[in-house]
Amino acid sequence: MKCDFCLSEARKYFKDGICRRCLHLRHGLFKEIVYEVGGIDSDYTLEFELTPYQKEVADLIVKKIVSQDVFLEAVCGAGKTEMCYELIKDCLNKGLKIGWAIPRRQVVLELGERLKQNFKGIKVVTVCEGFTDDLIGDLVVCTTHQLFRYKGVFDVLVLDEPDAFPFSGNDLLFSLMKQAVKGHVLYMSATLSADFNQVYHIKMPLRPSLEPLPIPVLRRAYFSLVKDIRWDKRVLIFVPTIKMANLLARLFGFGVITSKTKDKEAVLEGYLKGDFNILVTTTILERGVTFVDCYVYVLWADHPVFDAASLIQIAGRVKRGRSTEGACYFYALHHSLEVKQCLDNLRDMNTLASIVLKKTVSECTLSIGG
């Protein structure tokens, strides 16, 4: 027996021939959505010009997605969102339905606003908790949870950060994603897991600045934080648990944001505006938000909560976009395997970047694509 909605074949989920794993999604929530097919003018504008390396990757994505799934492994700050704009334009001009799915709600809302600014001539809809009244648009940006509404709709789906919570390791969400796509998927992240080794792999090791990725400084002594911390700069302090975050914030009067913070948006806005410059956080801020000229400090970096992918993302908050300064520090009594894998990944990407920079743009494709 196999569920035609979530693709489950596990007998434990079935009772009286009904799959109980996805029943809560089927009952009263799923709506059959029919789109009119027809090409539209979907040009976009950017405040900057893509580098030749970004253009090469953008063209390669459009070329390869026609016949197969693609994984874009791009370093944090590489501009992977903008490298997808040609794909969006190409799909819409051909009358193909394209969607963009992200595990986290806040990132959906921020990306939706960004895409609306860049694609003035199309309707961009954001679908996530609290935003489910309007489901139909030229471009749908949604959380991975909301993909159950779009069974068999998308010719192309951009799946952003498939290694992020809560999508990573969630068989139900993965099945719903597969059911939403009738064509191919572009997976994007700074880290490539073994789950995606069979898809076409593109590596993008360069940021637009063409500068190497900052390598975190390792510290075994926690008291050195007092010396290392830049009290007059924008500071992010990552800790592994909500309890630790709240305790640290209370002791020193720092700002704090975790998944349990009631006014998350207000706290983050105050930090970004400069109302205060030191923010304690958990992995909730490891992705999706760009901080200018930020110094990052990870306490208990050897804690099991921080896997290699998480540490790579956290280190990626430094010197991206318009940033000209910043640094990252890992504090840990033991340099765990996850810390080592993070550092190895960043160094490997810097090595690849140095190779790519020595080549012409046409040769660059051979080094970036794989």
Image (tube, rainbow, N blue to C red):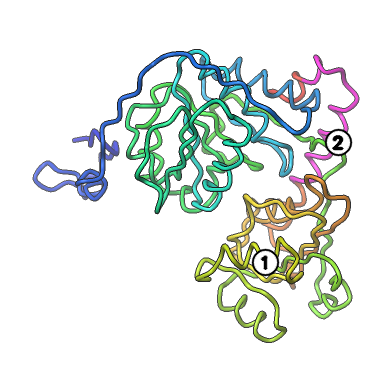
The number of numbered discs placed on residues in the rendered structure image is 2
Magenta stretch, overall SS = helix
Q: Which contiguous range is marked in magenta? A: 345-364
Q: Specify the quadrant that holds the N terminus.
A: top left
Tag 2: Cα neighbours inside 10 Å, few (<14), some, or many (≥20)?
some
Front-most of residues 240 and 152: 152
Image point (35%, 32%), residue name: 179
Q: Specify the quadrant that holds the C terminus.
A: top right
Image point (71%, 44%), residue name: 76
Q: Position of residue 157 (x, y in %)?
A: 48, 30
Task: List the residue tagged with mark 2.
Answer: 210
Residue 43 image-quadrant placement: top right
In the image, residue 320 above or below residue 361? below
What's the amino acid at mark 2? Leu
Tell me the CA gap for discs 1 and 2: 31 Å
Q: Is residue 144 left or right of residue 329?
A: left
Q: Is 112 included in the stretch rendered in magenta?
A: no
Image point (59%, 31%), residue name: 71
Q: Position of residue 99 (x, y in %)?
A: 47, 31
Task: List the residue tagged with mark 1.
Answer: 270
What's the amino acid at mark 1? Gly
